[in-house]
Amino acid sequence: MHGGAHEVEDFWGDLQDLVEGRHNSHFFGQIVTYKNEHGDQEIIDGQQRLTTSTIFMAAIRDVANQIYRDKVRGSQDEAILEMGDQLRDIRQQVDKAVRGKEHPSLIVQQASANQAQDLQNYFHDLTNGVDKAVNEKLTSEPKENMQRAYKEMVQWIKASYKEGKTVDTRIERLQRTFDAFMNKFYIVMISAPSQLDAFTIFETLNSRGKDLRASDIIKNHLMSLMGDNVNIKAGNDQWNRLTKPLDDNSDKITRFIRTYWASKKRIVPEPKLYREISTEINDVNSAQAFLRDLEKLVPLYTVIESPMTPRNHYDYFENKQITETLDVLSRLRVKLYYPVLMAMVYKKYSETGILQVANKLLAIFVRHRTIINDGTNRLETGFSDVARKIWDLELTSVDDIIAELNNRLLPSDPATEASFSVLEKAGGQRGAKRWTLVYLLAELYRAEYEDLGDQLYRDVFKDDNYQLVQIGNETEVGDRLNYVGNWALLEKKWVKEDVRDARSWTPYLQKSALKGNQQLADRIQANSWHAHDVDTRQHEFSQNVTLIW
């Protein structure tokens, strides 16, 4: 059950339209199945609808049971006891529909055997009234989605029930809600003679993919090309292996496939991704090659998404400088470069070459976005084009790649220096804004004052030893407050919350191990600190900008 928050809310809204008499019936969608070798109906399309329906039935049964315990049991009122029969009827109908563990009416999710059984056990507990399933803390996204859907439905059912003024009108409202679902929700059930036929029907019905993420319909397109059941099973197993590192999350899988396609072919907007892929991947051989590529590249993708954790990500590249550069890019929230790195790894470039290109990608981003603040469209298209040329062997060496990146995407030195001369950054205590300014200052300190050196990544990023401080306040520097020249990178142990002006910072700047801070303290003591001092410091920094990046 992927995501599904809006779908669950829509489900309840549609049901309330029936209860309130705004509609007479509701078409819930289609279910496409085929009969597998065990004689069971296996679902190709519609599992989320059935999962939502089962969770709803469990929720209304549990609310009915609670009402029975609180309001009916022990009552001497004949009318209330009669209403209690309705509550028991609801429970019996739900229990008959949901069924127990030995012969469940719905088995959820096809994944690895252990995952599938674990999820099925949880689904059984949730829909059979096991308290732990409702309240336990979960880390699995499919389980969290189920639990959230159940809790939301219970809240909505209770809120609707409480609109009645008396016990009998409340129970009558609950009964109407249950009856509306059982009698006025309609589905179209299509049972195909084989798995291949089921995939074909599914793809035809969902050719526009409006209700699905691109990854869902791409998967089914691939399976529909596989031919016989042996190839379908092999393809499905391969899909499950490559999506497991992405938490079987449709959004993550879609982003990964889009990145792969941008690397090998071209950048495509997500709504057009399925159409693009289905046009080019149109037989069993191309489908199998597509899956092989994805399985080969998913470890890299998970690394560039999170370079330092878990530990095996850190160990992906032998050259840790690559990992560290990727971590800096990740902290700056840079993702557009992924296709280039993907193409280089696929084509088995050396790690030395990959590091050279990774540093160039970082430099391009810093010039283009951080300093000049141009839009991302040009970078996204440009990186995709460079990646495709690597795949197609139009670029055959690291020198070729770097030359192409420089020619196409690296802003000129004069433009970069001009933008830096008036560059402002707001900083921040966390996130990309903070890390962007921290990174700029760390590199500028290293170039201008020979601070940090080879320990820059360890001290600044890994150990996070430094904090951003604004030297002069608004009274002292006016509209230069957020200029890069008015920021310092100071060891956290010397950062004091009550310091509010430049002169008060000088004793702490003097204690810093960074020569850049010591010189800054001398400058403030000699001349105080004003707007023209910020400009002077920023100009000094600017001499190194195009050498660093």
Image (tube, rainbow, N blue to C red):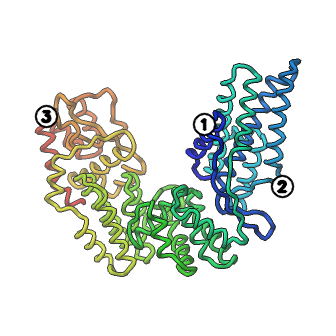
Q: Say which residue label 2 marks.
A: 103
Distance between the alpha carbons at the discs numbered 2 and 1 = 37 Å
Q: Amino acid at mark 3?
A: His
Residue 25, by quadrant, is: top right
Dot 1: few (<14), some (14–19), or many (≥20) neighbours within 10 Å? few
Q: Amino acid at mark 1?
A: Arg
First in residue order: circle 2 vs circle 3: 2
Residue 323 image offset from top left, x and y in percent? 43, 61
Q: Is residue 141 left or right of residue 136?
A: left
Q: Say which residue label 1 marks.
A: 22
Q: Say which residue label 3 marks.
A: 530
| Image vertical order of residue 44 relative to residue 284, above or below | above
- Residue at position x 72%, y 63% from top? 42
Residue 389 image offset from top left, x and y in percent? 34, 76
- Residue at position x 31%, y 51% from top? 439
Residue 118 image offset from top left, x and y in percent? 72, 54
Residue 14 image offset from top left, x and y in percent? 61, 41
Q: Amino acid at mark 2?
A: His
